[in-house]
Amino acid sequence: MQKPDLQTRLPRIETIDIARGLSLVAMAIYHFSWDLEYFGYVAPGMTETGGWKLFARAIASSFLILVGISLYLANGRGIRWRPFWRRLAMVVAGALAITVVTWFMMREEFIYFGILHEIALASLIGLLFLRLPALVTLLAAIAIIVLPNVYSSDLFDNPAGWVLGLSPDIPRSNDYVPLFPWFGPVLFGLAAVKFAATSGMLGWLSGIRPGRWAVPLRFAGRHSLAFYLLHQPILFGSVWAFAQVFPAPRETPQVRFLQACQVECEKTRDTDFCLSYCSCMLHGIEGEHKLNDLFGRRETPAIRQMLTGLARQCTEETDNRTFLREDAPDKDKPDGKNPGG
């Protein structure tokens, strides 16, 4: 393959626009599923576990890899400051809009550092890697992805430190995309496009012209920020309107709490433990008359403190019961002295 002339600008690579469009479609599918869960049409916690959780992470990774690729394609031959600042300002404005809207709609889980916030910060820091060798960029990407899995510190357990993602406690948010590990995919995309540029692959990709089937994806990919900002209000509003006419069957708050608790608990413990633990939690919350506050999204610092203490107590009680049950002799087991059992 012929290497492109680095002094001339490559034609727009349509396959990258299409890849971005596919990521947007996948994101819309995930958000629509989240909306269905929010309004009670699917099981609580569905989009936070199993394949759905992997799906969400794959979508976020694909977006951020494309951020690194686009950063190089736009500025790899020299930073074009005016377009860069204009695009960055639009991303920052979109991120702030999401923060403000979610603050009023779901204050206890509002988005203070989601994927748009990450894209804005990563775009700035990514400029430092434009001139570094591809191998160095790739090694930095690996280090950033690995670090939060092997290191955390209470020093970062504060609003400013949460941006880094190195706190042992993960703050509540409907979209939390901290610098570590999520700056890693950006650098991975940056390293990949550098390898592609030196191998001549970019010139080959720029010559690909997909057919008409790709027109909607290409259009969405070229207007990704507008698609991102508009799609969820449209989807959420549509499900809300449908729910006003055909509301989902509602379980009692007790059943809904147990379902959500079970899903969350089984991420780390077995089913038997979670059944006992969640029953203990429900009993404690009802004893404090706080169940309605939880479902009414009126979770205050005092309620969070109560939940933390109750979770610790229920964990200890459930572990103790499990230990005693496993340690107790099996009365049905023959012991030699009484062969008949």
Image (cartoon, rainbow, N blue to C red):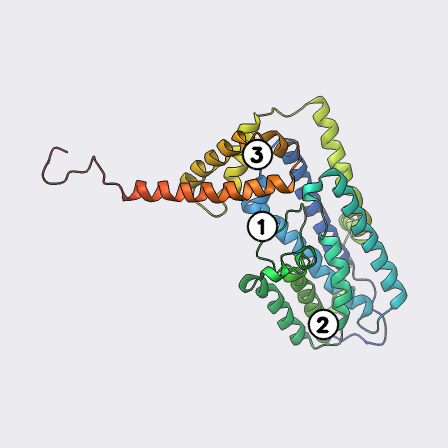
Answer with left or right where residue 317 lies relative to residue 299. Answer: left
State the residue in front, 9 or 56.
56
Label 3 Cα neighbours within 10 Å, binned few <14 / some 14-19 / many ≥20: some
Answer with left or right where residue 44 lies relative to residue 268. Answer: right
Q: What residue did someone put label 3 on? A: 43
Q: What residue did someone put label 2 on? A: 194
Q: Tell me, yes or no, whether the two marked residues, 2 and 1, touch with CB atoms within 8 Å.
A: no
| Residue 62 at x, y percent in the picture | 67, 56
Quadrant housing the C terminus: top left
Residue at screen point 85% across, 64% down? 84
Label 2 Cα neighbours within 10 Å, binned few <14 / some 14-19 / many ≥20: many
Q: Earlier in the sequence, mark 2 or mark 1?
A: 1
Q: What residue did someone put label 1 on? A: 54
Q: Amino acid at mark 3?
A: Ala
Gap between marks 2 and 1 measured at Cα: 28 Å
Q: Secondary structure at mark 1?
A: helix
Q: Tell me, yes or no, whether the two marked residues, 3 and 2, touch with CB atoms within 8 Å.
A: no
User: Against 168, is 75 above or below?
Assistant: below
Gap between marks 3 and 2 measured at Cα: 44 Å
Camera-side mark, 3 or 1: 3
